[in-house]
Structures are given as structure tokens and as C-alpha cells.
Image (spheres, rainbow, N blue to C red):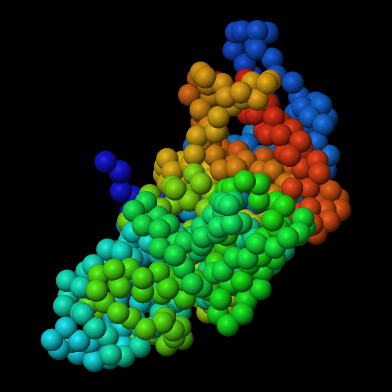
Amino acid sequence: MTKRISRRLFLSGAFAGAALPVWANPPSVSLRPVLRPDGLGKRTAPAASSLIRSSGISGEIGFAVADAKTGLVLEGHQPAAGVPPASVTKALTAMYALDVLGADYRFETTLVTTGTIKNGVLGGDLVLVGGGDPTLDTDTLANMAAQLKEAGVREVKGQFLVYGGALPFVRKLDPLQPDHAGYSPAISGLNLNYNRVHFEWKHGSKGWVVTMDARSKKYRPDVSVAKMKVTSRSVPVYTYEARKNVDHWTVASRALGKGGARWLPVRQPELYAGDVFRTLARANGIVLGKARKTNNRPAGQVVVRYQSGTLRPILKAMLKYSTNLTAEVVGMTASKRRGAPLGSLEDSANEMNRWARDRLGMAHAALVDHSGLGANSRLRPAELVSALAKAGSQTTLQPILKEFKFRDQKGRPVKQQAIHVAAKTGTLNFVSGLAGYMTAQDGTELAFAIFAVDADARRSIKEGERERPPGARTWNRKAKQLQQKLIERWDVLYGA
């Protein structure tokens, strides 16, 4: 059974109390060397500077580590340098959402009628109204279609409308990402299947057979708002164009092999959800017209209401799978709850920056989104560690973070890991971050943040290489090895 943490407890405990450590002329070496008891000679740790030099990582390294209970900073290297946090941002977003919305918050999706139902015929419009639910999937829409039938609707005389205006519309999470990147979809108040469409291809005797569907565990309805054409070429692998509210894709035949599948982003999220619901309604004997987007929230009778699971498990899944859409949706929902005027994703990120400054003392937080996909975001390791220590003192964040697994020299997972680490990773091209909590072998709990970035390497990436730039994978592997070695160092130095 999950322990409930109230919003009041979160506010009064996690974000109140001891002042933040002062970082005047921040040092780049250990601040508080810890005296070891008997046995010091048996356990030695290399200097952090030595680990950094031997890591082979180009660019800059910044980190900070503190006592998780008191917030006392133990060591830092460039702790006040602003760095791109990548998906480590999601840890801050989780704290933001829990604070503002509360752990028991639920998203709501409804079917609203604007006319009366008589003898199974709805005289007005039927509207699918989104409430920003990031977990809405095809199975849920199928259940809502069945409930609509149970409510007595057999025919709709008016229009079938879809509304996603609960949140600002974002056509592409990060404009710099490739068009076909499934982790950079559109976002609105009505999202389905993380706003991705499933593209599958097979080569038969008569050529290529392709499908575009909205599959889930039970259903896989075809969609009409996304179309794919196989073209005889080698590059580019994909092209994208929006025409008449339809996502038109082409794919290079020489890149397909014999068959396969992948998820592609959806750029018309409301119409995508409407397209799928229309198919599922027809399976229940309810014929609807083609979905049309409305910018006006309808006033009518709610005939079907669906509520998501509570927020805390949603955030745990977000942190585990690093789901960008979930981070942006919960972040914008929290900003809206705070009363911020939202015209864009950046407006919402600015509201979270204000929250981080006011609640956590993160005076230099400069985020451009809630997921960390935008490369222009900046956080300071020292400020983030102080925030983690405050949240950790009330066990707010730590239980929903993913366990970080150590690896041996050959890259294999360590079977018996003596140091427990719960943290959020962050990866962009030539950017690597890890922040969270570690429990040393003697039970000492520490909060830490480690970041590495090679800005010159990032600037040199060519447009066609953004998905897999040369050298990025090797660089990232070295960064992760350094993260593990630093954690092992802290276990030796401060685990007493």
C-alpha cells in the first residue's frame, strides 16, 4: 500500500526549514574532508580530479554531493556552473507536480453532449473533451465508447467534436529534433498513446505492405490522420509534411530491410484521438461524423467520465521510462493550477522556474521545458542537490526514482550491488547527467548531482547526424563510468 503524502506536509516539510548552503566563490575540491575511523588504510578513494582526468571525457564536468538529511554540502566540482540537465529535469518536474497538484490528483477525460437524447438519438453534438491525461490510451477510449452505448446513445445528429484546449498546443516538443523522433511529439489537452502512431512494414510478393494504427494491449485500430508512403531512395530515411490536417510521411525503401515497426510522432493529437474514438464507437454501433477540432470548451451534459490513476504512480512511470510527454503535461497542468497565463510551453517552464526559486531557493534555475529535451535549459549542480536534500528529508521523491544499476568493466550489470542508488538519468548528445540519492554501505544517505557536457562537440553535430552523431555513444559511456566511480568514491569518503 502506498503511503500517502499530503500536499500540506510536502510544503511545510520538504520546502521549509534549514537555509540553503552558501556558495560564494564555489570551490572545485572537497569542502569537508571526513575523518575516517580505524581501517582508513584499507579503504582509499582516488581524488575527484584524478577520476575526471582519467575518464577521457571531453568538455566540462560539474557535480555536488550533500548529506541527504541535513543538506550539508560535502564536496563539489564546478558546482555553480549552469549546465543542460537533460532528462534530470524530470526529477524537478515531479517535485513541482507533487507540490502543486498533490499525490492524489487525477486527470479527467469526458464525453459531453450539447443536446438531448431521445429514443437513442442525440439531437446535438458529441464532444470528446481532454483534461490533459498523459496516460490515455486506445483501451480507455474503447471503454468510453462502450459506456456511451450504455448511456443510451445510438445515433448522433450533430457534429462529433474534439477539444484539447485545457493545455496549450505544442506542435513539436523540441523543434531541433528530427521530425520522426517519437520522443518529440505534439502536446495538447487531449493526448492519446503518448501522441504516437504505430508504423509497421512488411515486404510481400506485391511489394511493401504498411500499416499505421493506434495499437494498445487489446486493440489496434487503423488511423486516417497519419499516412505513410514507401519511396525508392536511400536518404533521407523519413520525410514529413502536414496537409489538410493529415500527417503525410514517406520512408526510404532501402532503409526498411525485410520488415519491422516503430512509433512515429503525431502532430494532430486531438484529431488523432477523435479518429480512433470514431472507429471504436462504430464497433459499438454508434455512427459518428468525422472528428472536427473545436477551440471552445463545450457547455453540456457529461455522459461519460473517465479518471486516470493518481499522480504519484504516473510520476513514477515517467521517471522510470523518461516519458517526455508525461513530463510536459504534468508540468503545464501544475503551472495552470498556479494561475500562470499559459500561451506556450516556455511560459509554463518559466512558472516552474519561479516555483523552484521561491520554494527551493534555486535562484538560477533556467528551464525551457519540463522534460529536459530542450538543450537551452540550465541548472546548477549545487542548487539541485540542495533541492534534493529538502525533498529527500520527507521521502517525497526518492521512493519514485528508478534504481541505478552499476556495471562492471565489461559493461555487464553488477549482480550484487552494495551501494543503493535511486536517481534520474539525463542524456542528450554529448550531455550526460545523473542526480538523486545514494545509500552508502554503512547506511549513510547522500544526495548528489553529476553533469557532463561537451558544448563544442554539440555545436559541431551536422543536421543529418542529430539522431546518432559520431562519437556520442562512446562519450556517453565514459560519462556513465565516471558517475559510477564518483559514487563509489563518496561511499568510501562519507559512508561513516
Q: Is residue 122 left or right of residue 228?
A: left
Q: Position of residue 279 (x, y in %)?
A: 36, 70
Q: Position of residue 22 (x, y in %)?
A: 66, 48
The residue lying at 51 percent from left, 62 percent from top is 212
- Please identify the quarter of the rendering in which residue 100 is found: bottom left
Give the vertical position of 454 relative to 327 (above or below): above
Seen from the viewer's position, the closer of residues 485 and 187 is: 187
Seen from the viewer's position, the closer of residues 360 and 452 is: 452
> For the C terminus, which image quadrant?
top right
The residue lying at 77 percent from left, 27 percent from top is 51
> For the N terminus, which image quadrant?
top left
Q: Position of residue 155 (x, y in %)?
A: 24, 83
Q: Position of residue 481 (x, y in %)?
A: 69, 30
The residue lying at 29 percent from left, 76 percent from top is 111
Q: Specify the farthest residue to the left.
A: 119
Q: Is residue 284 left or right of residue 353?
A: left
Seen from the viewer's position, the closer of residues 374 and 51 is: 374
- Total marks shown come to 0
Do we see residue 206 in this rendering? yes
Q: Is residue 125 left or right of residue 429?
A: left
Give the vertical position of 27 relative to 488 (above or below): below
Do we see residue 88 in this rendering? no
The residue lying at 61 percent from left, 8 percent from top is 39
